[in-house]
Amino acid sequence: MELVLNEPLKSWLQVTQSCNLKCRQCYGDCAARPRDEELRRAEYAALVREMAEAGVIEVFVEGGEPLNRPDVFEVLAELTPRVMTRVRTNATLLTPAAANRLKEIGVGEVYVDVLGATADTHDWHVRAPGSFDRTLQGLKNAQEAGLPVSLLIIMTRRNVHELQQVLELAAELGVPRVGILRLYPLGRARTHWKELALRLPDQMAALQALRVPDSVHLMTSWHPKDGNCCWQNAGVDATGRSVGCAYLRDYADYGNVREVSWMDTWNNPTYVRNRAGHVDGGCDDCEETQGSSGGCRSTAFAFTGHWDAPDPFCSTTNGGIDVSQLPGDLEERRVHPAVPTTSRLL
């Protein structure tokens, strides 16, 4: 079955490339403070109107750390009357007041990142002592404010032995959904790849060993649930660059919304090709559950240099690639677009 969208329904929006932590696995290679080139509030407001008018019904908000942006509540308030708004956060800044504010302005769900089931493991990843306790407190603040909460964990060499404990922690905290995510070769994670990344057989073995508590729904994106989600994602980074999926931020440049309309970027030829899902040697088992085959375009392109290659993180289409080792020419595939000096959104 071929999945085709003529207009976007879902978007990813990066509201800042800054963060209060210094995570080894940071995909944005974030600074401590928001950068001058980030979209202004008025630009986000104009962009949100374009998205809603185009038919978008859901926006997933990320950073960096969204709550590290001083006017984040005002930015989110532009979204919530128009679309279902979900926010991903490390929760260390999610005070009772912040949680109540998110609830008041209509945020629909909060995703909290944990990097382990213990303080030692989590704090090693984020390089900030005490973060684990602050994250759990922030999660509880969100729950007390009446916000639906899900947990996310990126599987790494350092935390793979605690995945079962994370599921049990979620059950203990009353969190109904947990997402175990793969590690992507982006940002600062590339620099720390050797100390973070696992071989694919080790990843699959870890997933297969899990015993999911009855109260928890587990989300993963490995075979046989490895879909090519580029057909539905339509995201924009904090400088206005349209990248489709958040995991393409280092490799895709479909145009900048400061220069052209968001829908013009949607019709970029490379973007259209990636959404079409034409992959050489896709996985039938993944297609049966996901409606698309070939898997993630980010990891396919990062490891092979070809947009139409199958995903090496699928055990059927891996083709002998050791995903714990990055290809030597990866740096050549990264895009380094200039930030426009003027903006049509203002």
Image (spheres, rainbow, N blue to C red):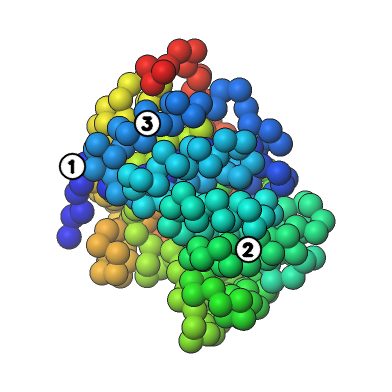
- Cβ–Cβ under 8 Å for marks 3 and 1: no
Question: Residue furthest toward the top?
Answer: 341
The residue type indicated by label 3 comes to Leu
Q: Quadrant of the N terminus?
A: bottom left
Q: Residues within 10 Å of mark 3 (few under 14, many from 20)?
A: many
Q: Which residue is mark 3?
A: 47
Q: CA distance from mark 3 to mark 1?
A: 19 Å
Choose the circle earlier in sequence order: 2 or 1.
1
Q: Is residue 232 left or right of residue 195?
A: left
- Give SS at disc 3: helix
Residue 29: x and y in percent read 64, 39
Q: Which mark is residue 245?
A: none
Q: Which residue is mark 1?
A: 6
The residue type indicated by label 1 comes to Asn
Query: Does the image show residue 23?
Result: yes
Q: Residues within 10 Å of mark 2 (few under 14, many from 20)?
A: many
The residue type indicated by label 2 comes to Asn
Q: Which mark is residue 141?
A: 2
Residue 209 higher or lower than 136, as above or below: below
Q: Nearer the viewer, mark 3 or mark 1?
A: 3
Q: Nearer the viewer, mark 2 or mark 1?
A: 2
Q: Nearer the viewer, mark 2 or mark 3?
A: 2
Q: CA distance from mark 2 to mark 1?
A: 40 Å
- Give SS at disc 1: loop
Query: Does the image show residue 8?
Result: no
Q: CA distance from mark 2 to mark 3?
A: 30 Å
Q: Residue at x 63, y 63 (%)?
A: 141
